[in-house]
Image (cartoon, grey):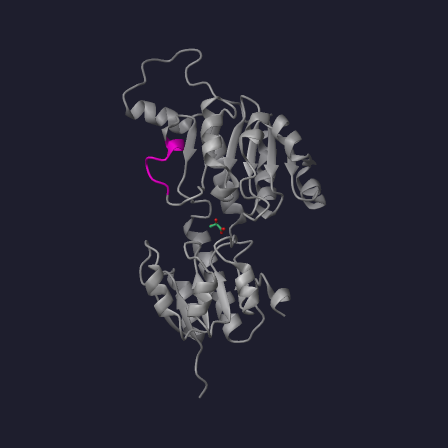
């Protein structure tokens, strides 16, 4: 009789994901859906496991790996993995997997929800009404920015950036993009034209950020970049909060350049109700819900489970991040 691998799951996941893991592994989990496992409990739970399924709420670093000496794989339930110290994993030959592809369209939908809500002042209007502040209809009351026919600037031409660009067709928008390297794929698929970042910021009416958080992109939007934008421009971030220097965005919004911002992500999450950005009427904030639909979160969980099981049972892994580095 062969023994099953032992794995740890850092959150209660949708049942289909747990079923995939249970069929091949012995698992223990932090049996709470809403709150992350406390760090000390996590470190005490993993000394004998062959693999761990993590969320972006867990910091996976040298300390984590030292607490899990048998661990062969970290299966992160997210496409982004800035919560993981990849160099530390590589040094220990631990495989990292992520969940690309399954959330692309859902995150692009949310980028558009923020773009439209922000450009047309939907949340500001709702707040005004519920506060009893709607006095009358008047010609220039709550005027916003036209979306149809405007120029959409995508920063980050990966899967999500391309999916945001595809949706612009229905609004007859002109699409420009910036990426580390020009991407023939996004140009062919969406007709988007490449720009330097500075030119994109000068030209775009709506800027949507969908870059991964790396040493290069950390803090890439600060006072200098906001000063290049139009006074009518809308800035949308569905990537990671730390690509933006938040206090510089706060000051830029107060000065009216950009005109407004729709933000799904923040440098430190969850942000408190006293965060300066939330005091501004021209900010629409969402609590990192880009991929949050029932279907997509279930797909992400089952894909992370499939990656975990494949790695601990020696099968080909669907979404390895560092296979070539660890050999
Ligand atoms: C990711 O997958 O990186 C998202 O931010 C969570 O959906």
Would you place residue 308 above or below residue 56 in this image? Answer: below
Q: Which residues are magenta?
A: 271-278
At horizontal 46% and vertical 35% (from top left) the residue drawn is 246
Q: Can residue 188 be seen here?
A: yes
Q: Does residue 322 show up magenta in the picture?
A: no
Q: Can residue 30 be seen here?
A: no
How far across and down, in percent of the image, does residue 29 sit?
Answer: 35, 66
How far across and down, in percent of the image, does residue 272 sit?
Answer: 34, 40
Q: Observer-nearest residue: 319 or 87?
A: 87
Q: Observer-nearest residue: 117 or 29?
A: 29
Is 318 on the left-hand or right-hand side of 190? left
Would you place residue 110 above or below residue 311 in this image? Answer: above
Task: State which quadrant residue 173 falls in.
Answer: top right
How far across and down, in percent of the image, does residue 210 sit?
Answer: 55, 42
At horizontal 35% and vertical 27% (from top left) the residue drawn is 126
Q: Observer-nearest residue: 272 or 163?
A: 272
Would you place residue 95 above or below residue 137 in this image? Answer: below
How far across and down, in percent of the image, does residue 117 sit?
Answer: 45, 30
Q: Does residue 277 show up magenta in the picture?
A: yes
Magenta stretch secondary structure, dominant: loop
Q: Residue furthest top?
A: 139
At horizontal 46% and vertical 62% (from top left) the residue drawn is 302
């Amino acid at each position: 009789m062969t023994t099953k691998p032992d794995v740890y799951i850092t959150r209660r996941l949708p049942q289909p994901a747990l079923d995939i893991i249970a069929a091949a592994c012995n698992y223990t989990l932090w049996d709470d859906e809403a709150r992350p496992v406390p760090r000390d409990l996590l470190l005490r739970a993993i000394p004998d496991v062959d693999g761990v399924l993590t969320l972006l709420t867990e910091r996976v670093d040298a300390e984590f790996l030292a607490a899990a000496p048998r661990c062969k794989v970290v299966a992160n339930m997210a496409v982004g993995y800035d919560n993981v110290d990849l160099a530390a994993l590589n040094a220990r030959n631990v495989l990292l997997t992520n969940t690309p592809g399954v959330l692309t369209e859902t995150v692009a939908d949310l980028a558009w929800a923020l773009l439209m809500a922000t450009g047309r002042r939907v949340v500001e209007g709702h707040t005004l009404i519920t506060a009893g502040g709607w006095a009358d209809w008047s010609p220039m009351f709550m005027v916003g920015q036209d979306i149809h026919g405007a120029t959409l600037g995508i920063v980050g031409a990966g899967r999500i950036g391309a999916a945001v660009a595809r949706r612009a067709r229905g609004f007859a928008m002109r699409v420009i993009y910036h990426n580390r390297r020009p991407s023939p794929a996004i140009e062919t698929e969406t007709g988007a034209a490449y720009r330097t970042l500075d030119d994109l910021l000068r030209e775009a009416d709506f800027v949507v950020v969908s870059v991964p958080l790396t040493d290069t992109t950390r803090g890439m939007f600060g006072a200098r970049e906001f000063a290049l934008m139009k006074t009518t421009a809308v800035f949308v971030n569905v990537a990671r909060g730390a690509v933006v220097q938040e206090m510089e965005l706060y000051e830029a919004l107060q000065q009216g350049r950009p005109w407004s911002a729709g933000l799904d992500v923040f440098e430190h999450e969850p942000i408190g109700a006293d965060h300066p950005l939330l005091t501004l009427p021209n900010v629409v904030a969402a609590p990192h819900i880009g991929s949050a639909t029932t279907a997509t979160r279930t797909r992400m969980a089952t894909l992370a489970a499939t990656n975990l099981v494949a790695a601990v049972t020696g099968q080909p892994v669907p979404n390895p991040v560092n296979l070539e580095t660890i050999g």
